[in-house]
Image: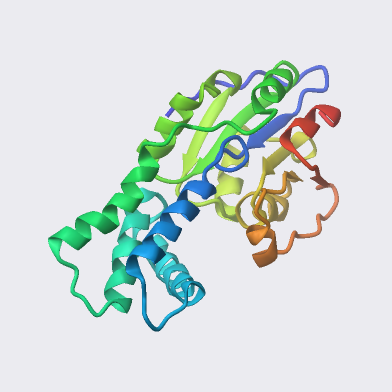
Amino acid sequence: MFEMQLPASSNGAQTLLVDADDTLWENNIYFERAIARFISFLNHQEYSAAQVREVLNQVERESIVMHGYGLHSFAHSLVDTFERLSVEPVTPELHARINSFAREIAGHTVEILAGVPETLDYLAARHHLILMTKGAIAEQEGKIERSGLKQYFSAIEIVAEKDVETYRALVAKYDLPADTSWMIGNSPKSDINPALACGLSAVFVPPDSFLEIANYVLSKPSAPSRLLVVERFGDLRQHF
């Protein structure tokens, strides 16, 4: 894990914790495509595609508790869902086919979202940037290296979960002052609400898909925390 000592704050510099997946680069679309291929492959005769997706969602929640985030957990969820819904047993051939949907995600190119590199370049010259991402360490490290964005960050934190306790631990680790520290991300559940709950300010960058915001309401900040909503990542240059 890449980590450097943060420089002392000066000249109005603030600390910006920045999410990675679906904030800096595309991520969810690859899982959605894999899920669509899986549902088509399953070709259930009684369940609609939406019903199969509901079962998979429940299985994923269970799998995350046991296996954490990442492709291993996702592959496990696909196999488990197939076993629950298919009348066919999972043969070695079927197992390999189902796992291939997850393996295809691992090989995709890191697709940087519009405006990200130039915005990070601008922000890194003015503020202290920490990349904060959750997931399997090897997978996240691989994406960070392939992204070409590592140079903009003073530190990188790969965590198992983004909850209030994790944010509090990072606040203590880097001695982050609440009045000049922000979490920037696309997820109310993982990026915005727990950061606000532990006293940080937050910037919500809505994802292209509003599934996340539909499932989780943005919390209202309590002073001195602030909540900023921007349309796109590049808009951060207008505020920081």
Residue at 63%, 40% in the rendered image: 23
Residue 14: horizontal and vertical position, in percent?
75, 28
Name above or below for residue 81 compared with residue 179: below
Q: Image quadrant for the N terminus? A: top left
Pick whichever, 215 or 46, lies toward us: 46
Residue at 67%, 64% in the rendered image: 216
Residue 52: horizontal and vertical position, in percent?
44, 73
Residue 94: horizontal and vertical position, in percent?
20, 62
Residue 215: horizontal and vertical position, in percent?
65, 66
Q: Residue furthest left?
A: 92
Q: Image quadrant for the C terminus? A: top right
Name above or below for residue 17 compared with residue 103: above
Pick whichever, 201 or 133, lies toward us: 133
Please state if 235 lies on the left or on the right of 124 as rendered. Answer: right
Please state if 75 lies on the left or on the right of 225 as rendered. Answer: left
Residue at 24%, 80% in the rendered image: 87
Pick whichever, 100 or 206, lies toward us: 100
Protein image colouring? rainbow
